Amino acid sequence: MNIIKTLAEELNIKEMQVEKTIALIDEGNTIPFIARYRKEVTGGLSDEILRTFGERLTYLRNLDARKEEVTKSIEEQGKMTEEIAQEIEVAKTLAEVEDIYRPYKQKRKTRGSVAKAKGLEPLAEIIYAQKETKPIEEIAKEYVTNVETVDNQTEKDKIVADVQEAIAGALDIIAENISDHANYRKNIKRICYREAVIETKAAKPEEKSSYEMYYEFTENINRLPSHRILAINRGEKEEFLKVKINKPEDKIINFIERDVIEGQTQFTDYLKNTILDSWKRLIEPSIDREIRSDLTGKAEEKAIKVFGKNAKQLLLGAPIKNLTVIGFDPAYRTGCKIAVIDETGKVLATTTIYPTEPQNDVEKASKELLELIKKYDVNMFAIGNGTASRESEIFVSDVIKQAKEKLGKEVHYAIVSEAGASVYSASKLATEEYPDINVSLRGAISIARRLQDPLAELVKIDPKSIGVGQYQHDVDQKKLSESLTGVVEDAVNKVGVDINTATPSLLSYVSGINKTIANNIVKYRDENGKIKERKELLEVSKLGKVAFEQCAGFIRVFDGKNPLEITGVHPESYEVAEKLLNMIGYQKDDIKDSEKLKEIRTKLSGLNIAKIGEELKVGELTLKDIIAELSKPGRDPREEMPKPVLRSDVLKFEDLQDNQILTGTVRNVTDFGAFVDIGVKHDGLVHISEMSHGFVKNPSDIVQVGDVVKVKVIGIDKERQKVKLSMKI
């Protein structure tokens, strides 16, 4: 297989791009580094394309390796032919290779293998050839064992007692050969994918469950969306559903018969029955497993991509800067946990209040919060969206009114996803960060910090626990983990990391930095004080030249020796950046001066990129990036993202009315639509059909997690507290 050509065709890029990108990956460069600092080499491939590139490269290399193993095994058996070699060569998937190899695999004991051990293979060949005119019973007599000649147990296993056993054994061999025929399996799967229908029924019809829509359900497998596949799988696993794939059996049987049976002979009925036996006993169960596995694999791949896209948007959520925030972790019996966090993320105070059931001590709780607001000049509440969130929101909105009346203070609140907060609270990392703070209060700290800086806080949590996916607990956990690690890496490196404030969790996702090096950086910082310039990182234990090259451009050194180090300009391009500034009459220190920066920005925007690139001997893509960085030094790309919706009063479910227009925040995007937080207890659903007046193929083409959208209420289910929304306004 020509891997370079295959990747070029699949990703619609040039073969030269593929060759050079493979070389970069094989040299040990990370995806973020290649995407950001090797654009001239790759032709400007994005981090998303490069992730797909890396996955496909690994798959195709594994495919090539498997082809070599299969070829070697068949050759060692002396059964390789030009036709088989060609089939292996053109196979595009591991499944195709395994189908080709199936007849040559070492099998466990089967009816066919037992018959072969009894010497019935020649009889099977005679029947299959359909040429012999002598009655089959006479032919079979030659294969019946003379029992008198058998003298040990091994030989007894090879006894063919009579003609019927001889014929039955020969037909078992034929049935197995038909089942192992790669072309039959390929075409049967093609027929099934075109025409088969999945059917689900209730395993316990009288029991209510979340799978009721599947209690009597059928759909063509080629139209089954990924979220339904995963829902059906889960329903089957939890024993609420029975699942069956209905296939066009007559068409499949006729297809095999047309290829096997050569006119009407004494062997015809035997072969027809054998084909049916092969289908029912051997092929169908195997095809069922393969189809279910293929459907699940594709559904999982889609779910992982959806989860990854949502997680990236959540990680890149706009930070709320320069505000003192009260983190409010709602609860009932154990009380609501409170943490006051200053604008730098420092914990100023913690407490527990009891405004919810069963204590309902609203007066004392209100008084305590008002004191905290006054003492620490609080601007915001970040309320977790878990248990008792709704009651807590009503309580907080009342406290906000009191703050305005009694303190003359404008305070707002935002609802924050607390997914994974409890996991973080009990983690080793949280214990190290807050050894003197009770585990129950750490969740409130995490909730507040998520509002202040989503990325810095969410990297402390296992990405699977972020809670913005679709059936993430049902998919291949290894693949999910690998994908999400890549997503977090891309997000962290897109934003850049302040080397003097970043936690080990954040640093460990920077290109070229592993957990050991991340801890060593923090240790070095603790022992030597603030890091003053990027090259100082070379003094950190285990951070060598290779790691430095990979990480340097993603590190930010604020108030350091070199102003270029608050930008994404890589040290390898410092000389080019300084020459560029000199060409327009400025020095690198001038980018710190806001007035001069305006002038610099204007002059840079009017440059002839091609001409300057030639003069400075630098590629146009790299030059454009340098210009962008010099124009906005210290820029946080998240500032361009939608800000959280800030509220001061609560919307009750009872206040909702049909056709009401509301503003909400997209909390999750799935295959079938988007969930939008409109300020009531449960997020409302905008179904894919209600996202646009035009056709929508994929909801993520319309909205992303964190987007602020206007929606119209089109359905209210008071009993289940569910709201249907529309974006067709």
Image: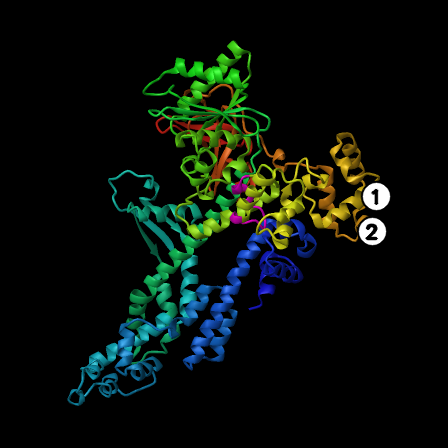
Where does residue 34 sit, x and y in percent of width and height? 63, 53
Element on which disc 2 rests: helix
Q: Is residue 259 magenta?
A: no
Residue at point 81%, 43% (across, down) = 607
Q: Nearer the viewer, residue 425 or 157?
A: 425
Seen as rendered, the residue at the extreme top is 406
Does residue 152 appear in this view? Answer: yes
Where does residue 403 sit, x and y in percent of width and height? 51, 14
Where does residue 624 sit, x and y in percent of width and height? 73, 46
In the rendered image, which quarter contains the N terminus?
Answer: bottom right
Chain-order first, disc 1 or disc 2:
1
Q: Tell me if mark 2 has few (under 14), some (14-19) or many (20+) residues whose alpha carbon lies within 10 angstroms of its own.
A: few
The residue at which mark 1 appears reads as 583
Does residue 248 appear in this view? Answer: no
Amino acid type indicated by mark 2: Glu
Residue at point 47%, 30% (across, down) = 445
656 lies above or below 282: above
Q: Circles 1 and 2: CB distance less than 8 Å?
A: yes
Q: Which mark is residue 615?
A: 2
* Total marks in image: 2
Amino acid type indicated by mark 1: Met
In the rendered image, which quarter contains the C terminus?
Answer: top right
Tell me if 217 is positioned left or right of 659 in this view: left
What range of the chain is rendered magenta?
A: 503-516
Residue at point 65%, 39% (across, down) = 557
Seen as rendered, the residue at the extreme front is 527
Q: Nearer the viewer, residue 466 or 337?
A: 337
Q: Tell me if mark 1 has few (under 14), some (14-19) or many (20+) residues whose alpha carbon lies within 10 angstroms of its own.
A: few
Tell me if 17 is positioned left or right of 541 in this view: right
Element on which disc 1 rests: helix
Q: Nearer the viewer, residue 466 or 608?
A: 466
